[in-house]
Amino acid sequence: MDRILIEALSVDTVIGVYDWERSIQQSLSLDLVLATDIRSAAATDDLRLTLDYAAICQRIQQFADAHQFALVETFAERLAECLRTEFPITWLRLTVRKPGAVANAVSVGLEITRGNLPEATQEISA
C-alpha cells in the first residue's frame, strides 16, 4: 500500500475547553499519512486516480471552519471519519498539534490511526 504525506498543515479553528478559547480561533498543525493505491494514477498520470492533496487540504480547512470542539481528541476523531468517508483512504495516521497550549511546551497533541493496512505493510507502519 502506498502512502501520501501531508506535513505541517496549518488550520485555524475554534477549539478548547476554556471560555476564552471559545471566542477565538487557534491554529492547529496537522500531519497526515494516507494509505491508498497510486499505481493506476502513476501509470496514467491522471489526478483523478489518486488522492488530490489540494482537495484534501481544502476539505480539512472546511471541516475546521464548520466545527467547534472542546477537545483535540474529538477534532481528530471526527476529521478522520470525514476524510475516510469522502476520499478513497484505506488507512490513515493523523497527528494534531496545538501549539502554545501548555506553557514551556512548543505544542501538545495526539496521534491516531484508523483503518486497516494490508498485512504486508503493517510491519513498516510503526
Image (cartoon, rainbow, N blue to C red):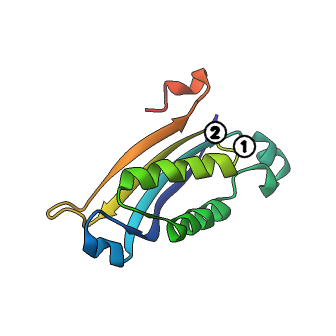
Q: Residue furthest top?
A: 119
Callout 1: few (<14), some (14-19), or many (20+) C-alpha neighbours within 10 Å? some
Element at label 2: strand
For marks 1 and 2, give the CA distance: 6 Å
Residue under the image location 39 percent in, 45 percent down = 111
Residue under the image location 53 percent in, 46 percent down = 33
Please tell me which residue lies in front, 52 or 90.
Answer: 90
The residue singled out by tag 1 in the image is 38
Q: Residue furthest right?
A: 44
Q: Quadrant of residue 88?
A: top right
Q: Quadrant of residue 63?
A: bottom right
Callout 2: few (<14), some (14-19), or many (20+) C-alpha neighbours within 10 Å? few
Please tell me which residue lies in front, 35 or 71.
Answer: 71
Do residues under tags 1 and 2 come within 8 Å of each other at their CB atoms?
yes
Nearer-N-terminus badge (1/2):
2
Quadrant of the rendering where the C terminus is positioned:
top left
Quadrant of the rendering where the N terminus is positioned:
top right
How far from the left and from the top, in percent, is residue 65?
A: 52, 71
Element at label 1: loop
Name the amino acid type tagged 2. Asp
How far from the left and from the top, in percent, is residue 75?
A: 44, 55
Check residue 61 in the rendering and tell me which mark sits there, or answer none.
none
Name the amino acid type tagged 1. Ile
How far from the left and from the top, in percent, is residue 2?
A: 63, 39
Instruction: Using residue 45 as the reference point, say whether residue 13 is left or right of it.
Output: left
Residue under the image location 25 percent in, 67 percent down = 18
Please tell me which residue lies in front, 66 or 7.
Answer: 66
Instruction: Using residue 30 as the reference point, say whether residue 70 is left or right of it.
Output: left
The residue singled out by tag 2 in the image is 2
